[in-house]
Image (spheres, rainbow, N blue to C red):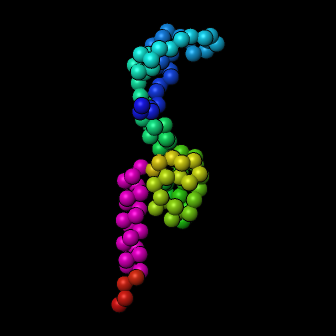
């Protein structure tokens, strides 16, 4: 049987149960099957790397932690796990690659 994450709040709503009530109620397999599936990726926070002006540091917009600028090659924050918007990482990796290519050229 396939495992999936379900939205317990939607299940409570479907059954007409107030989530704050501490009561026992029975759930059928049909109720569980009807509960909407949650995409696990939707639970993961998202953020951006923002470069600090006049600095070689950047900040995670999710947890506000400060890192050296090279951390932007990663598509997630190592502290809070926020997934960084991919276009930001792609732009930085491309720019970093160009810088490295130019630095390693032999004249």
| Residue found at x 50% / y 21% | 9
Q: Is residue 54 visible?
A: no
Q: Which of 29 and 14 is in front in this view?
A: 29
Across and down, in percent, residue 91 comes to: 37, 60
Q: Is residue 70 magenta?
A: no
| Residue found at x 62% / y 10% | 23
Q: Which of 7 and 68 is in front in this view?
A: 7
Quick check: 95 above or below 21?
below
Quick check: 104 above or below 71?
below
Across and down, in percent, residue 48 comes to: 47, 50
Which stretch did the figure color magenta?
85-103
Quadrant (top left, top right, bottom left, bottom right) of the N terminus: top left
Place residue 20 in its image quadrant. top right
Across and down, in percent, residue 8 comes to: 50, 22
Q: Main secondary structure of the magenta part?
A: helix
| Residue found at x 40% / y 64% | 93
């Amino acid at each position: 049987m396939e495992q999936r994450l379900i939205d317990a709040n939607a299940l409570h709503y479907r059954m007409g149960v107030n989530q704050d009530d501490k009561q026992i109620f029975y759930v059928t397999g049909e109720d569980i099957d009807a509960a909407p599936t949650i995409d696990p990726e939707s639970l993961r926070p998202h953020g951006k790397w923002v470069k600090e002006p006049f600095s070689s540091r950047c900040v995670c917009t999710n947890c506000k932690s400060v890192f050296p600028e090279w951390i932007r090659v990663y598509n997630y924050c190592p502290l809070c796990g926020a997934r960084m918007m991919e276009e930001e990482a792609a732009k930085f990796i491309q720019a970093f690659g160009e810088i490295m290519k130019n630095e390693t050229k032999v004249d």
